[in-house]
């Protein structure tokens, strides 16, 4: 099996029974904030795009690059579709001209002509990607590969059960706006960033240890930030709180925990993977490439500047009545929302900075009051500050997912009272009837599910499944003193009270091993 690195989470898998192109991303994403790192735009995409199968793990724009898919990927390719709850991905592919689809039944091995086998695991909670993320398992001639990219299943057993895996490709770096955009003192930001960076690596080690593949390939990040306004997010400034470590940092951190089987793929690197081993060739020596990272980024910045400027010029739509349009689109969704609105539980304020860089219009999305209105000097749950032009653009293009556009762009700052609130972001990624209904239904089912099984961690008996997204705490749970941390997303819980310290709600059921009367199953979850 041949694996060609094509940048970020993208790869081309070649076997004698056919080829699969995965997640080809080349054009900048999220308001021209993210670019693939290392640069992959000079690869021979005309020939890379001539494939038998196409797989895109999810609809995040650093995975689903509509322009590139339209221009460079053969429309004869059969699209391997994860079993997602909505038809959005298939609709988007059809709009680009793709007509051949294989809807892979979730977690079932599908045998393709010539003996190529695939299995796709779709993750479908409202917090997985833009309503869905997925991983692809491939087997040919006894060689098995798992392209986990940035999916975060609770464990990898469904893949491990299919036999020893030879190549495991997974995310290790950051792909979020936290903590950089928060209005915090620099020391706090650095401390939170460092925690986050450590947690990302811990989660990666856990997945690697779960699967015990022969070879581990760090993929799906980091992106690079080429706009001058975002340049500081590149991990080139010696900031230990930077959440975007690169593949060379992965190798050195992995070595510290005993990892010796890491393989970095640069765009154009080719790994031949067999049951016996892997041999890899690179377009330039990997060490040399990372030693020259700053020069690479600076050269890219100059080359991509016209692209960024052209994008920026397209954002302003002064004719859009922002308050009126937000009311028209968001209020009907607030009316329908039960779980998300309750979960947010307070007003969320948007401060929109005008074209002059100074004037500010403040708009509130009032979740309890179910309305969108001018800010009225009240206390708010979250406050976002961004350019008015960005919101105009979102309204102009009728964007239904502000996470997959505004928030991932990092072109905003934020402040909040209290803990992280996942419902805020879940709501702003569900600005369509279809998505909102799905998310509401998911939380409805989730709320009703009680989880009676308990496990012992240190001095504590706790429910087996994490109250966040059901990670198995026998694998992901760590108890230190009276605090439980679930390493899947790093959420923390105060065990004596059961309170979640990371987000509102999500109480955990717990009692000391020697306590006389444990709480009845489910009671603590309400
Ligand atoms: S499943 Fe997300 S923190 Fe546990």
Image (cartoon, rainbow, N blue to C red):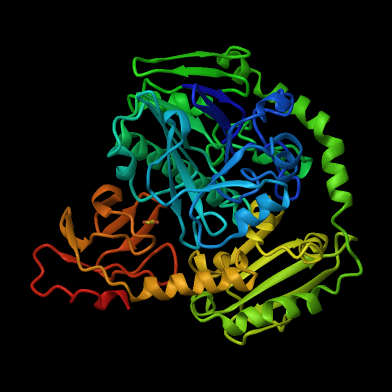
**Which residue is nearer to you in this view: 161 or 372?**
161
**Which residue is nearer to you in this view: 38 or 497?**
38
Residue 387 falls in image quadrant? bottom right
**Residue 133 in view (yes/no):** yes
Percent across and percent down for residue 396 are 82, 64
Residue at the image position 32 percent from the left and 78 percent from the top: 526
Q: Is residue 86 left or right of residue 297?
A: left
Residue at the image position 74 percent from the left and 24 percent from the top: 42
Q: Residue furthest front?
A: 113
Percent across and percent down for residue 358 are 85, 63
Decide: is 445 above or below 332: above
Decide: is 426 above or below 362: above
Percent across and percent down for residue 365 are 66, 77
**Which residue is nearer to you in this view: 214 or 295?**
214
Residue 27 falls in image quadrant? top right
Residue at the image position 37 percent from the left and 47 percent from the top: 108
Residue 300 falls in image quadrant? top right
Percent across and percent down for residue 249 are 50, 27
Q: Is residue 335 left or right of residue 517?
A: right
């Amino acid at each position: 099996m041949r694996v060609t690195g094509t940048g970020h989470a993208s790869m081309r898998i070649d076997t004698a029974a056919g080829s699969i192109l995965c997640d080809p991303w080349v054009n900048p994403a999220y308001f021209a904030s993210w670019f693939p790192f290392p640069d992959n735009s000079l690869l021979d995409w005309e020939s890379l795009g001539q494939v038998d199968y196409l797989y895109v793990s999810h609809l995040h724009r650093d995975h689903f690059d509509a322009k590139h898919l339209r221009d460079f990927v053969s429309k004869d390719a059969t699209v391997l579709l994860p079993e997602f709850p909505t038809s959005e991905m298939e609709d988007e592919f059809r709009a680009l001209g793709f007509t051949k689809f294989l809807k892979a039944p979730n977690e079932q091995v599908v045998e393709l002509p010539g003996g190529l086998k695939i299995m796709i695991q779709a993750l479908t909670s409202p917090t997985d990607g833009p309503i869905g993320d997925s991983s692809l398992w491939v087997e040919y001639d006894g060689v098995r590969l798992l392209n986990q990219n940035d999916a975060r299943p609770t464990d990898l057993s469904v893949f491990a059960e299919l036999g020893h895996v030879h190549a495991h490709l997974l995310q290790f770096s950051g792909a979020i706006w936290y903590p950089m955009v928060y209005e915090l003192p620099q020391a706090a930001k650095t401390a939170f960033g460092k925690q986050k960076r450590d947690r990302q690596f811990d989660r990666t080690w856990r997945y690697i240890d779960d699967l015990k593949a022969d070879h581990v390939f760090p993929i799906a990040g980091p992106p690079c930030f080429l706009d001058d306004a975002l340049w500081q997010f590149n991990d080139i400034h010696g900031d230990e709180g930077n959440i975007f470590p690169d593949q060379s940092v992965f190798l050195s951190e992995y070595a510290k925990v005993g990892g010796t089987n890491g393989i970095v793929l640069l765009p154009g690197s080719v790994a031949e993977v067999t049951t016996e081993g892997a041999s890899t060739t690179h377009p330039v020596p990997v060490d040399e490439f990372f030693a020259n990272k700053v020069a690479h980024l600076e050269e890219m910045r100059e080359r991509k500047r016209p692209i960024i400027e052209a994008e920026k010029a397209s954002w302003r739509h002064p004719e859009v009545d922002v308050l009126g349009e937000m009311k028209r689109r968001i209020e009907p969704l607030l009316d329908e929302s039960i779980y998300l609105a309750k979960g947010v539980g307070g007003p969320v304020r948007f401060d929109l900075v005008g074209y002059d860089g100074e004037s500010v219009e403040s708009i509130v999305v009032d979740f309890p009051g179910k309305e969108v209105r001018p800010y009225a000097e009240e206390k708010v749950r979250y406050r976002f500050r961004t350019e008015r032009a960005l919101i105009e653009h979102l309204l102009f293009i009728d964007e239904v997912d502000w996470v997959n556009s505004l928030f991932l762009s990092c072109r905003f700052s934020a402040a909040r009272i209290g803990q992280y609130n996942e419902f805020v972001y879940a709501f702003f990624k569900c600005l369509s009837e279809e998505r909102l209904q799905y998310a509401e239904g998911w939380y409805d089912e989730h709320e009703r599910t009680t989880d009676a099984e308990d496990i012992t961690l240190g001095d504590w008996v706790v429910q087996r499944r994490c109250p966040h997204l059901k990670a198995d705490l026998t694998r992901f749970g760590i108890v230190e003193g009276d605090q439980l941390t679930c390493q899947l997303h790093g959420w923390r819980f105060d065990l004596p009270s059961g309170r979640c310290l990371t987000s509102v709600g999500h109480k955990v059921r717990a009692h000391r091993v020697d306590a006389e009367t444990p709480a009845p199953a489910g009671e603590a979850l309400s």
